Image (cartoon, rainbow, N blue to C red):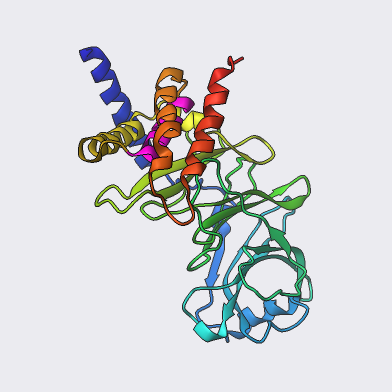
Amino acid sequence: MKQHLQNTLLGLSILLMLSCSVVHADRTTSETSEIEYHRYDVPSDPEGQRYHRFFPGPAPEELFYDTRQKIVANIDDTPQKETIVSIVADSKHDAFAGNWSHAFLLILDETEAGVPKKKAFFKFLDSATSDLDDPAKTVEFQKPPFVFNLGSYPGHGIPFRLVDLTGDGILDVWFDLGEAIAVISFQNGEFKVVFSCYMNPRHQGPEYVDLDNDGSYEIKIPYDIYMVDLPGVRYVRWISLYEWDGNIYVLNNERFYAENDEFLIALLNQYNDLLTRYGRYEPYSFYLGLVFYYRGNAAMARTHLQRVVKHAEKRKYTRTVKAQDYIQAAEFLLKKLAKPRR
């Protein structure tokens, strides 16, 4: 028992040191050393407005185009640099509040005549009621499994940065939309969306981390899952881990939760506190069951998930999350546990 505790503490210490040392550890390459960043402070900046010509016409009456940021760097397999520009459609009724309704990412080549030429044009999170007549390709954002109460549009700001996430020596675009992350990568001769996912970063931000030092980054997307109005225990902090499979980023939560004792201990402590004060609380049972499911502990997973199926209907949740959400998910996992793993 003592030896097991020592091993656990040692493992936690190693995990903590690794997380402190590798988070956002951008690789220093010839490409990253030649990145030029430029931000636009006001929508009336003439240099920023020159990129609005790629829209077929002016913004609808209630909106205006606002160029936010430009980066010049080489992000494909040609020797020339590209110009990457972020543009939003802001509301004239709430200008400069940061609550934009459309976001765009424009990738350009500079011609010999100094006139920018479009290479790719993406539109993110079209949350407005008005339709924009634009040539951009709409990016659909995914909702992760077993996270039920995510928003459908972002909040403030759209900073983006360049980093070689896939490990192929070509810089990728990491685009932060406030409540979602997208990654644009040059693959097989064209720019593609290789990752897009909603998040809820109330207490922690998204991270890219090379966990196994294989040259490509894993992506950690946070969620603070709203539970109930109980002081100190209103949120479950959850992480979805995505890894590069050579084509796109795919979910691999089994890898993240298999040996993450620190996360499991924190969740157990919260749950035990609820048991002491309130008897039980089924959403915590669900996420504990999910963690044990990912860790391959079928017995503990069944114990917590069966509790959800038995008791969740008696609890009140939020307007967007119902007891049935947890019950259906728990029943789905219990069916999978009933099947022998190959």
**Most foreground residue, 55 or 35:** 55
Residue 177 at x, y percent in the picture: 53, 61
Residue 126 at x, y percent in the picture: 64, 66
**Most foreground residue, 167 or 232:** 232
Say if 4 sits above or below 38 in the image. above
Quadrant assignment, res 110: bottom right
Quadrant assignment, res 10: top left
Say if 4 sits above or below 330 in the image. above
Report whether residue 332 is seen. Answer: yes
Total marks placed: 0
Residue 210 at x, y percent in the picture: 49, 37
Residue 29 at x, y percent in the picture: 55, 48
What predominant SS class does the magenta segment belong to?
Answer: helix
Task: Look at the image and give the residue range highlighted in magenta.
Answer: 281-294
Q: Is residue 279 magenta?
A: no
- What residue is rendered at 50% in x and 79% in y? 41
- What residue is rendered at 50% in x and 82% in y? 94
Report whether residue 213 is seen. Answer: no
Quarter of the picture containing the N terminus is top left
